[in-house]
């Protein structure tokens, strides 16, 4: 059973509420979304493992058990080319839950006309594998978002 923690502070939402059909339909995998609190904040590792992919707006960590967790900060933020993101880690780093990965500013993203909603999903996992999950509650980094048994 993989326990996935919140990478950012905000209010948890159903992943179906993400204003991006790829995430909302669960095509990437099961998970939870977070409407982030405003102002600059650190995005942290939601699980322990290897940081296998790192972009200024998104990262993937693979647990020792093989599950990969994607954190995607905002919608269409890939087009920002790193503007308002500061990376604190490197691809291939071994990270522990709660380690800082990057700093970002949800207010800045919203000011560009984009949604700052953060998606946290388990890649290549059956949606029925998701167990307990937090939706509609305030979360801070390292709070439990959901459990999954892929």
Image (tube, helix red, strand yellow):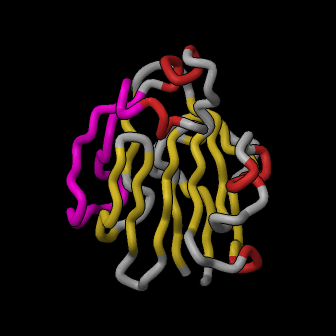
Which residue occupies 59% across, 21% down? Answer: 110
What secondary structure prevails in the magenta region?
loop
x and y, in percent, of residue 45 in the image: 38, 55
| Residue 38 horizontal side relative to residue 137, left or right | left
Placement of 129 over or under 138, stated as above or below:
below
Q: Is residue 100 left or right of residue 1?
A: left
Q: How many marks?
A: 0
Give the residue displayed 49% in from the left and 65% down from the top: 69
In the foreground, 54 or 11: 54
**Which of the 4 quarters of the picture holds residue 117?**
top right
User: Which residue lies at the image location 41% right of the left edge and 61% below the top edge?
Assistant: 60
Whole-percent x, y for residue 46 in the image: 44, 57
Residue sticking out furthest to the top = 111
- Above or below residue 104? Residue 92 is below
In magenta stretch: residue 51: no
Q: Is residue 116 left or right of residue 134?
A: left
Measured from the top left, where is residue 6 in percent x and y? Answer: 52, 50
Residues shaded magenta: 81-104
> Which residue corresponds to the image point at 35% horizontal and 48% vertical from the top-left?
55
Image quadrant where one finds the N terminus:
bottom right
Q: Quadrant of residue 17?
A: top right
Q: Is residue 63 above or below residue 17?
A: below
For residue 123, side relative to residue 15 (left or right): left
The residue lying toward the viewer, choosing from 129 and 21, is 21
Residue 89: say if magenta: yes
Q: Position of residue 109 (x, y in %)?
A: 52, 23
As displayed, is residue 31 above or below residue 50? above
């Amino acid at each position: 059973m993989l326990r996935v923690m919140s990478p950012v502070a905000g209010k948890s939402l159903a992943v179906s509420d993400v204003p991006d059909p790829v995430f909302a339909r669960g095509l990437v995998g099961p998970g939870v979304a977070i409407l982030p609190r405003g102002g600059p904040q650190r995005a942290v590792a939601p699980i322990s493992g290897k940081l296998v992919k790192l972009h200024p707006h998104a990262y993937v960590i693979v647990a020792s058990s093989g599950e990969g967790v994607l954190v995607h900060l905002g919608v269409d933020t890939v087009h920002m080319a790193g503007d308002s993101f500061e990376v604190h880690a490197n691809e291939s780093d071994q990270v522990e839950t709660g380690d800082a990965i990057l700093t970002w500013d949800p207010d800045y993203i919203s000011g560009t006309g984009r949604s700052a909603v953060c998606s946290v999903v388990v890649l290549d996992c059956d949606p029925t594998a998701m167990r307990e999950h937090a939706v509609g509650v305030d979360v801070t980094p390292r709070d439990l978002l959901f459990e999954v048994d892929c």
